[in-house]
Image (cartoon, rainbow, N blue to C red):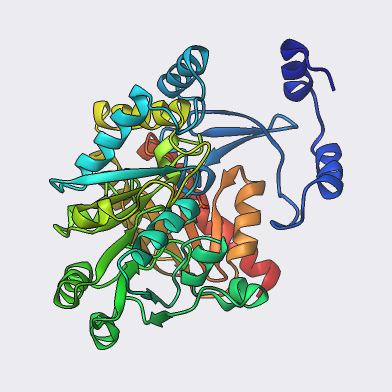
Amino acid sequence: MTADPMTLSRELSGPVSSEAVLEAYTDSVMNTFGLPKRVFVRGEGCYLWDAEGRRYLDLLSGLAVNALGHAHPTVLSAVTGQIATLGHVSNFFATPSQVALAERLSSMTGASEARVFFTNSGTEANEAAFKITRMTGRSTIISTEGAFHGRSMGALALTHNPKYRLPFEPLPDEVIFVPYGDAEALASVVDETVAAVVLEPIQGENGVVVPPDGYLARAREICDQHGALLWLDEVQTGMGRCGSWLVHIDQGVAADIVTVAKGLGNGFPVGACIASGQASRLLGPGSHGSTFGGNPVAAIAGLAVIAVIERDGLLDQAKELGDHLQRTITQLSHPLITGVRGRGLLQAVILAEPIAAAVVDAALAAGFVINAPHPDVLRLAPPLIISATELDSFVNILPSLLDHVAQESL
Ligand SMILES: Cc1ncc(COP(=O)(O)O)c(C=O)c1O
């Protein structure tokens, strides 16, 4: 392969066949994700194109990431402008965009004192949060059944699924799992030995599970009673996905630690651990670090995303479109659909049978990208810039996808 940039980009964006790429994939990329179902070569707005030129409506946004869709002009010009000016300097030095993003994220928490540790992913944001909790002098963490917080050894210790955990044990221990959404279960385990309670405001990977109203507020009270930190993992739910910057703020709840990533950079890898008050002072020089975290390009990507979401009123739009999606799917009254749940543009269609994986394949064949976090759950996390008409195109075809799969497999 050439090192000449013009030739390199032609080689990568020129004609390739999916078959050839997938054959090479198997021999060159570790098999942690299974064989990819498509090879995508281009994206624009809410659409993706595969190597054979077929177009797909992206209703997954790279797993709740591309809030502004693909190749958004503002993100593009912010990122290219920044990399042309100053791409990276390490955390021995500060840059204006890094500080501006830290201020912006801190202000989203509503806390009078908040500080940010920047990372490249949600997992790393949670690792930073985990380390903060250890600095309290207490070590027990309360997590929840069904929780997903990442796959590094620390984040995995807080992730519940035994399939992910068991091959890698021993993990950091002193983690207690309680049923999600059950505030009294939480109350029964939190005491003066607990450093933190970590919760997703909505469990994304567990199938978009929405807790009962008041759950986060009650968790706040329980933490306050025992001097434990409330750590909210908004990696999937935050940054506008559910119709607000942060779900817990929308519910009037304050957290001590908030982690975000995914939608923050619209595909540029950036995550953040935002701590408030006393928790924002627990990590000192040498206690944590990251070479890339908060580099100026990642930071400007985050600032650009926030600016566009604000300018284009995408928080309200996400709420309205989420309600529209719930309503129109419910109105289908399809016998294989037992419910729709979620907030804003993080929604799940609950199926009466464990056929979600086959429905995902049928949707792909019909030109729609969705996913199945559970055998009986379809997840929809489209770009926040999507239109009601585009969502309707999926809702209209959903009954025939379900019927087709039912005919083939039930
Ligand atoms: C709630 C939550 N936390 C953490 C993570 C891990 O984030 P990442 O994959 O960016 O490391 C995810 C990813 O799905 C997530 O949904």
Above or below residue 262? Residue 351 is: below
- Which residue ends up furthest to the bottom in the rendered image? 188
Q: Nearer the viewer, residue 125 or 74?
A: 125
Q: Quadrant of residue 311?
A: top left
Query: Quick check: 298 left or right of 357?
Result: left
x, y percentage for residue 96?
Answer: 33, 23
* Number of marks drawn: 0
Dividing the image into 4 quarters, which one contains the N terminus? Answer: top right
Quadrant hosting residue 375: bottom right
**What residue is rendered at 15% in x and 47% in y?**
110
Residue placed at 24% from the left, 83% from the top? 191
Residue 260 coordinates in the image, percent (x, y): 38, 49
Work out whether residue 252 can be spotted: yes
Q: Is residue 174 above or below residue 299?
A: below
**At which x and y percent is residue 102?**
30, 36
Is 299 displayed left or right of 351 in the figure? Answer: left
Q: Nearer the viewer, residue 243 or 54?
A: 243
